[in-house]
Image (tube, helix red, strand yellow):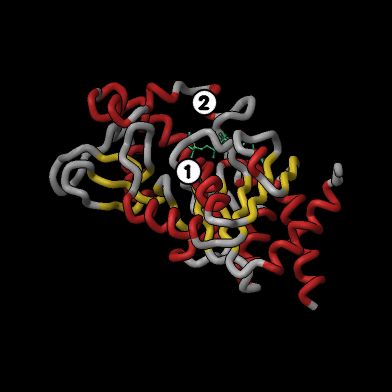
Amino acid sequence: MIMDVGDKTDVVASLILRAERVVALTGAGISTESGIPDFRSPGGIWSRYDPDEFSFQRFLASETTRRKYWEFSRDFYPVVANAKPNAAHLALAELYRLGKLHCVITQNVDGLHQKAGIPEDKVIEIHGTLLFVVCLDCGKRYPRDEIQRRVTRGEIPPRCGACGGILKPATISFGQPMPAREMRLAEEAAASCDLFMVVGTSLVVYPAAALPLLAKRSGARLVIINLTPTAHDNYADVVIHGKASDALQKIITLVKAKMR
Ligand code: APR
C-alpha cells in the first residue's frame, strides 16, 4: 500500500505514542534550514572541500593542512555560531518536553539541539562539537569563541597557550578515533529503544550509520525522515522523503492531538 506523507506522519505519531522509549539520530540535514550547509547535497561542504584533505592524519602531519583547515573553520564557525534552531529542532525539543523522546544522538557539531531546549545530557554528540577547541597534546579545552578571536586576528594555526601544542576544534574528523563514552551511550540508547527515528542524514558514515540497524536488530521500529533516499531506507518501517521541519511539525501536532 502506497501511503502519502499525510498518512505516514499519522502512522509515525501513533508509533511515538505507543513507544516506551523513543531515540532520535540526526545529521546535517536537520540543520540546513538553519542556514548550515550539509555535506553531500549538491553545493554541500564536500562539493567545495576535499574530505581527504581534512583527514585527521593529514591534520596531524602537516602545518599547511592545519592552516587550511583553520582558515575553513574560521570562516565556517560564524555560520554555526549565529544559526538558530529551526522548526525541526524545536519539534524534537517539544517531543522531549512531552516525555516522548528519551535522547538525541547527533552527528552534528552545531549545538542546535541544545539551543532548542534539549538538556546537554540528553544530546549525544558522537562527532564532537564545534563550540570547543582541544589541545591534541595536553588535552586542554578552550571555548571556541576565545580561539575564534585569536584566529580572526591572524593566529593561524593557533597553538595551545599551556603547552604550545596543536589545537583542533573538538569535532571528530575522518580517521580520528570516535569518542568512546558517546559511542557507548549511543549504542546503549539504540539497543534499548523501541522506536528509532532518523532525521536528516544520508546514513553513509559509520559507525553512526550502524545505529539504526542496531536498533532494528534489537526489536525497535525504524522511522527515517530525509529529503532524499538514504542508504538504509529498505530497513525502515516508515520512510518520509521530505523536509524535516515539515514532517516533524506535522508529527508533533498529531502527537499532541492524540495525547488530549
Ligand atoms: N530536511 C530533511 N533532510 C534534509 C534536509 C532537510 N531540510 N536538507 C538536507 N537533507 C538531507 C540530504 O538529502 C542528505 O541526505 O540530509 C542528508 C544529509 O546528509 P549528509 O550531507 O551526508 O550529512 P550527514 O549524513 O550528517 O553526514 C554524516 O559525514 O562528513 C561527515 O562528520 C560529517 O557528521 C557528518 C557525517
Q: Residue furthest bottom?
A: 260
**Ligand 1 shown in quarter:** top right
Up the image or down, 242 lies above or below 56; here it is below
x and y, in percent, of residue 44 in the image = 58, 29
Label 1 CB sits under 8 Å from any ligand 1 atom = yes
State the SS at label 2: helix
Q: Amino acid at mark 1?
A: Ala
Up the image or down, 3 lies above or below 155; here it is below
- Residue ID for mark 1: 208
**221 on left or right of 128:** right
Tell me if residue 104 can be seen.
yes
Label 2 CB sits under 8 Å from any ligand 1 atom = yes
Q: Spatial distance from mark 2 to mark 1, Cα to Cα?
A: 18 Å
Q: Residue furthest left?
A: 163
Asked if the residues shown at circle 2 and circle 1 are in contact, with their CB atoms under 8 angstroms apart, the answer is no
x and y, in percent, of residue 173 in the image = 37, 35
Tell me if residue 149 can be seen.
no
Q: Residues within 10 Å of mark 2 (few under 14, many from 20)?
A: some
Query: Quarter of the image holding residue 156?
Result: top left
Q: Residue at x 51, y 45 (%)?
A: 80
State the SS at label 1: helix
Q: Residue at x 53, y 58 (%)?
A: 104
**191 on left or right of 196:** left
Up the image or down, 93 lies above or below 206; here it is below
- Residue ID for mark 2: 46
Query: Quarter of the image holding residue 184?
Result: bottom left
x and y, in percent, of residue 175 in the image = 33, 32
Q: Quadrant of the C terminus?
A: bottom right
**172 on left or right of 62:** right
Sequence-wise first label, 2 or 1: 2
Q: 108 or 211, which lies in front?
A: 211
**178 on left or right of 190:** left
